[in-house]
Structure formats: structure tokens, C-alpha cells
Amino acid sequence: MEAAAWRPGLTADLATPSLLGEARALLVTALQGAASEALDEIARYALEPNPESKLVLTYVVSPRAKGPPAKVTKMLQGRARIERIAIDRKELPRWVLERARKHDLKATPAGAAALVETVGEDPGVLGQSVAQIADAFRDEGLTPATVAAQFRGFGERRIFELCDAAFGGNARDALRYLAAMLGAREQPLAILGGVAARVRDLLRVRSLPPGMPLKDVAREAGLRFDWQARRYREQAGRYEPEELADIHRRVVEADAQLKQGGQGDVVLTMLVTRIAGVR
């Protein structure tokens, strides 16, 4: 489970012997997002861990860090084995080629490099992408052409997912999508353009009568599908008209900031957080 979703008492299952005798383990990801209560409980468990169970903690750190922060290692009181898991940027294409071999998929170095440039540097995403290529282009293999064919419009899909999460109030997923897109070298202005387009769509949908049939909403708002009208109506309904207007103003401000040299990760993170947390 993610540390941000920690529930009190999770380590009790590790400390209590199983009635059926099976081995127990708890994997806690993204410990950097843990509340103090979770860290306190883990620290107490570390004093007297159950030798028959495993508690695995993951902590995302900067590329230069040699391990988790000192406060984390201190709370574990030297009772944990710390292991750094990382793949350097320059080694990612070779790692992709190794993954392709595990799928019995032909792959070229150029294809591996193209995949990294297209979907980003997240090993999890890269591994899933190799599997997709293996399913869709078994005979052709992993090449720049198959990467382009499989992931054409990848940026557009991610912007759509980012907007759905942000305007649906899911800040965590929205920020994940944003980080993945920036990591894949999507242009901040292009991402902002997608967000601006969604704001305009929501403003148009919000201005239409609530009881209007979906097909009419789609036509009047310039949407292609009825399901878009339904989703956008739900998203627009989360905001008062003045709140949508405020978001539109913030989009304009973000555009000016980016064009004046503002950092995309800072400007867009602030904007996405505001959108997701308005209500």
C-alpha cells in the first residue's frame, strides 16, 4: 500500500503469528508521503520485529542521494537492510533491450532509445510499454517505427488523463500524470494548452441548461462524443461559474509565466494542485 493511505495498526498483522502458518509481508511504497503517525508505528515495530515476517519500505529520493533521509534510518535503529535501486538515464536503453529479450521480442538500439524518448524514464512505464509492443508487433519487433505506431498521440492521451484527474478532484493521480509527462520531455506549454482547452470546454458545458440532452450538449459545446458531454458536465458541476472563471484566469497567468522563463514543473504543479483542490 502507499504510505499516504496508511491505516493505524497495519504492523499488528506482521507481529501476530498467522493461524494458518503462512508467511506474511507488508510492502509500503512512497514512504516520503507518510504521516508522522505511520512513521511512529513503523519505528515501534522496528524495535521488536517479527522474524517470521517481512516489512519492506520504499522511499523515492533524488538521483544523488545515497539512501533515505537520516531521520528514516534513525527511526529504524539499524535493524533494516537498506538497498538503493536505480537505473541511470544513460542505461535505460540497454535496460529496455534486456526487457525485450525477456519477452522474446526483437529490438534495435534505436527502437529502445525511441521508446525512452516517447514514454519517459519510469522503468515501470517502460516495462509495460515493451510488453505492449510485444503484443502488438511481435513480428516487427521494437523499432522506432513500431514505437511511433503504438504510442502515436501518447502525449495527447496523457493530457486527457491529467485533465480528467485534476478536474475530477484527484490531485494525486493528476500530479503523477504531470510528472510522467514532464519526465517524458513533453513541452510545458503543450501541456498547458491541453488544460486550457479543457477549461474552455467546461465553461461552455457549464453555460448550457442542466436538463439539456447529452447529444445536444455535445453539439453545442463542440464535443465529438456524448460520453464527453456526460463527463464534462460532471466535472463542470464541481465548480461554481466564478471558480471556473478563476481557473481560466490562472491558466492565462501560467501561460505568461512559462513564456517569461518560469519552470514548467513549478508553474504547472501549482496550477494542477489548484484545479484539483478548488472544492
Image: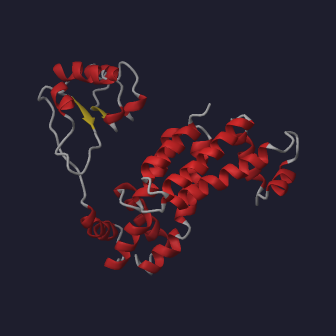
Q: Residue at x 47, y 69 (%)?
A: 135
Image quadrant in which you'd find residue 52: top left
Where, quadrant-wise, is the C terminus in this rendering?
top right
Where does residue 83 sit, x and y in percent of width and height? 17, 44
* Residue at the farthest left position: 78
Left or right: residue 151 versus residue 229 is: left
The answer to which of 108 and 185 lies nearer the viewer is 185
Q: Is residue 95 above or below residue 199?
A: below
Where, quadrant-wise, is the N terminus in this rendering?
top left
Image quadrant in which you'd find residue 122: bottom left
Left or right: residue 233 versus residue 160 is: right
Q: Is residue 139 above or below residue 121?
A: below
Q: Residue at x 78, y 49 (%)?
A: 204
Q: Is residue 24 above or below residue 255?
A: above
Image quadrant in which you'd find residue 17: top left
The answer to which of 254 and 21 lies nearer the viewer is 254
Q: Residue at x 83, y 50 (%)?
A: 217
